[in-house]
Image (cartoon, helix red, strand yellow):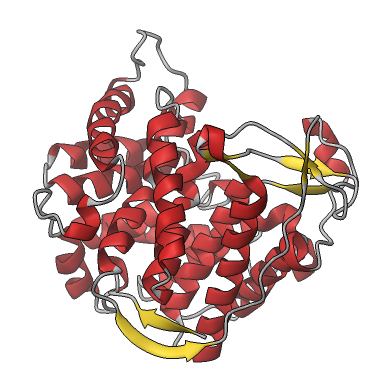
């Protein structure tokens, strides 16, 4: 038996009162206030310095339309620079540093993503499911009181692909659309914080997210469909992308905070543990300090080929390790998470704005949860899930 521990709730989840939420989230953190747990995080100083250096570079591009090499950016390039929610990235940097200049960076990202894309007259939230980014819009409303950001978040939750209530559930049953399901769940939960009622569809999509984890790691029934052939991936193979697993874990962790049902909370913990144990045992490449980007085998019983690590994506996965450590107190997840975090900080490519965003959009949670783990209070114990067996790795 291990003991679940209640997390210290993040500012965005602190209250359903909008005015109080704004006060809680707009108060910048003192960057000099360091607990022993935070100071012990490896590569934390490098994470912070790269945040400032590369953040300034990519912010300047969003503000001027010219990249660091002097190239004028097209509409598509400017939009691509906001992928993985640049608004949320820059607002978190503002909260971390207390420096208001980062608010102007978030504003520049908002123009590109919200105004020029989500809120276009011919769009109104009708974006592909993988472009459904609502964290930054929620934060902008909480911090700045921007009603248009609130409206945009609600429109995304209603109209983005796979989020609309009329979408047949059969379309999202397969783990092939796990990312779209995760982003839809996130949009539902974020708009609840904006005062919207709970969507009836939330329960269905959460259950499908649990089902995606089952398809990947428990029953291991996931197989690629014909759409994968366009990306050079064989059809009908057992296929895993660790960063996609990270996105599903993020959505379920948000759901954990939004439900008061102890059984549902325990289920989230168990399924996150399944993911993290499998990824560490099967996809972690110690020599590269990273998980591989993707891998496939003809059948789940066949060993994977060895693959190089992809540190650019570590920090989409690392926060779940800190969260599970915070919830359970099991230091194994702290120690593994520290390796994942450090590997991402030290090995990631940050010259591109998309890569910068994907490294910083969730890594603030890693730092936060590692710190909060030291003050988390005990909750009722639950039985751990069975260990996930290792899938052997074969050499090419």
Which image quadrant for residue 234?
A: top right
Residue ranking furthest to the top? 70
Q: At which x and y percent is residue 233?
A: 82, 35
Using residue 292 as the reference point, say whether residue 64 is left or right of it. left
Q: Position of residue 166 (x, y in %)?
A: 69, 69
Instruction: Give 10 or 267, whichever is nearer the viewer.
Output: 267
Q: Nearer the viewer, residue 253 or 154?
A: 253
- Name the residue at 22% across, 70% down: 21
Answer above or below: position of 181 versus 48.
below
Quarter-wise, where is residue 150 in the image? bottom left
Q: Measured along the vertical axis of the image, is residue 162 above or below residue 258?
A: above
- Residue 343 is left or right of residue 273, and the answer is left
Residue 330 vs 96, above or below: the answer is: below
Q: Residue at x 55, y 44 (%)?
A: 122
288 displayed left or right of 173: left
Q: Is residue 258 visible?
A: yes
Which residue is pictured at 29% across the width and 38% down the height? Answer: 47
Q: Residue at x 47, y 60 (%)?
A: 320
Measuring from the top left, give residue 75's x and y in whole percent: 47, 25
* The C terminus lies in quadrant: top right
Name the spot of residue 241 as percent of width and height, x first: 67, 46
| Front residue (pair 285, 95) | 285
């Amino acid at each position: 038996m291990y003991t679940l521990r209640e997390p210290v709730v993040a500012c965005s989840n602190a209250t359903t009162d909008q005015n109080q939420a704004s006060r809680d989230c707009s108060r910048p953190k003192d960057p000099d206030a360091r607990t022993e747990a935070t100071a012990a995080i490896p590569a934390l100083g490098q994470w912070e310095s790269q945040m400032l250096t590369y953040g300034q570079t990519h912010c300047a591009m969003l503000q001027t339309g010219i990249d660091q090499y002097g190239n004028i950016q097209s509409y598509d390039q400017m939009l691509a620079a906001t992928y993985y929610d640049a608004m949320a990235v820059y607002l978190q940097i503002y909260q971390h540093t207390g420096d208001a200049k980062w608010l102007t960076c978030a504003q520049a990202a908002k123009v590109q993503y919200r105004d020029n894309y989500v809120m276009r007259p011919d769009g109104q939230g009708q974006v592909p499911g993988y472009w459904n980014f609502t964290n930054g819009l929620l934060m902008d409303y909480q911090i700045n009181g921007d009603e248009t950001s609130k409206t945009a978040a609600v429109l995304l939750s209603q109209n983005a692909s796979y989020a609309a209530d009329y979408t047949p559930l059969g379309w999202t049953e397969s783990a092939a659309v796990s990312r779209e399901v995760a982003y839809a769940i996130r949009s539902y939960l974020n708009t609840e914080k904006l005062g919207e009622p709970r969507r009836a569809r939330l329960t269905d999509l959460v259950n499908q997210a649990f089902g995606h984890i089952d398809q990947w790691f428990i029953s291991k029934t996931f197989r690629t469909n014909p759409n994968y052939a366009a990306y050079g991936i064989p059809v009908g193979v057992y296929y895993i992308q660790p960063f996609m697993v990270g996105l599903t874990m993020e959505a379920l962790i948000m759901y954990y905070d939004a439900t008061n049902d102890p059984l549902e909370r325990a289920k989230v913990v168990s399924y996150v543990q399944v993911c993290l144990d499998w990824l560490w045992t099967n996809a972690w490449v110690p020599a590269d300090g990273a998980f591989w980007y993707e891998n496939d085998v003809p059948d789940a019983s066949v060993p994977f080929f060895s693959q190089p690590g992809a540190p650019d994506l570590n920090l989409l996965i690392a926060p779940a390790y800190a969260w599970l450590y915070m919830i359970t107190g099991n230091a194994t997840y702290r120690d593994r998470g520290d390796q994942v975090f450090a590997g991402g900080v030290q090995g990631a490519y940050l010259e591109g704005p998309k890569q910068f965003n994907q490294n910083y959009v969730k890594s603030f949670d890693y730092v936060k949860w590692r710190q909060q783990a030291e003050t988390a209070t005990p909750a009722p114990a639950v039985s751990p899930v069975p260990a996930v067996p290792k899938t052997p790795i074969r050499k090419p």
